[in-house]
Amino acid sequence: MRAIVAVAPDWGIGDGKGMLYHIPGDLKYFREQTKGHTVIMGRKTLESLPGGKILPKRRNIILSRDRKLKVPGAYVCHSVGELLLLLEALGEKDAFVIGGGEIYQKLLPYCESCLVTQVSQEPPIPPTVFFPNLPKAGWHIAKKSAPQTENGLEYVFTQWEP
Ligand SMILES: NC(=O)c1ccc[n+]([C@@H]2O[C@H](COP(=O)([O-])OP(=O)(O)OC[C@H]3O[C@@H](n4cnc5c(N)ncnc54)[C@H](OP(=O)(O)O)[C@@H]3O)[C@@H](O)[C@H]2O)c1
């Protein structure tokens, strides 16, 4: 599995309710990368999506400990173990972990790479939710795009490997 994320310079990813930046080029990149794939997200990230709705044109898996939670059109898993069994049963080897902070942290050990959009500017709102600090965890950058500029923000698309 792979993670995909947009991070601030300090690896901040959100304020608990939403994302830190609005970057249409990054949303397009996210759609292109994940379209037709399986996406795995935490219940709080699902709630942060427009209308609290699952992502179209993708197989959605939601992680929640709430056994009563039903999400139309999506699988709900109640533990990492249950998720791994589901992925195996589906024959799914290339799912994307799409957040948030808790889920990235729990699933990083199962990821063979991370697609990280790294924004140079500090976010307008202080982050309270973070992605694991990959250099500190011993990961390295395997690929890096040319710098992109949009809405006064500079960012690069990077691919990290353990
Ligand atoms: N920058 C980005 O690329 C990006 C991407 C995605 C999200 N985000 C941001 O991240 C923030 C949300 O992240 P978050 O850490 O607060 O929440 P989260 O990771 O989206 O969801 C946490 C929830 O996942 C469930 N969960 C966690 N571990 C579990 C386990 N082992 N088994 C079963 N369920 C489990 C629990 O749901 P229950 O409480 O229902 O049990 C928990 O409350 C938002 O600000 C969002 O905008 C940013």
Image (cartoon, rainbow, N blue to C red):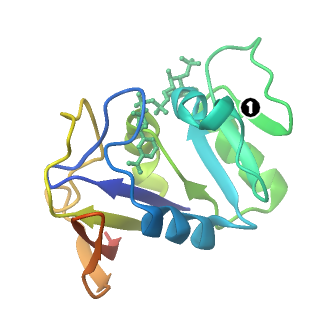
Return the residue found at the far right: 73
Residue 52: horizontal and vertical position, in percent? Answer: 65, 30
Q: Is residue 20 left or right of residue 39?
A: left
Residue under the image location 25 percent in, 77 percent down: 141
Q: Secondary structure at mark 1?
A: strand
Residue at left 28%, top 54%?
Answer: 7
Residue behind mark 1: 76
Q: Residue at x 58, y 59 (%)?
A: 96
Residue 108 in picture, x, y percent from top left = 41, 51
In the picture, the quarter occupied by the N terminus is: bottom right
Tell which of 12 and 62 is nearer to you: 12
- The spot of residue 79 in percent (x, y) is 61, 29
Foreground pick, 74 / 117: 117
* Residue 112 visible, this orientation: no
Residue 18 image-quadrant placement: top left
Within 10 Å of the Cα at label 1, are there few (<14), some (14-19), or many (20+) other Cα atoms?
Answer: many
135 shown above or below 41: below
Q: Residue 27 or 80: which is nearer the viewer? A: 27
- Is 92 left or right of 64, judged from the image as shown? right
Q: Nearer the viewer, residue 29 or 82?
A: 29
84 relative to 76, above or below: below
- Quadrant housing residue 31: bottom right
Q: Position of 56 compared to 49: left or right?
A: right
Residue at horizontal 79 percent and vertical 28 percent from the top: 71
Residue closest to the far front: 151
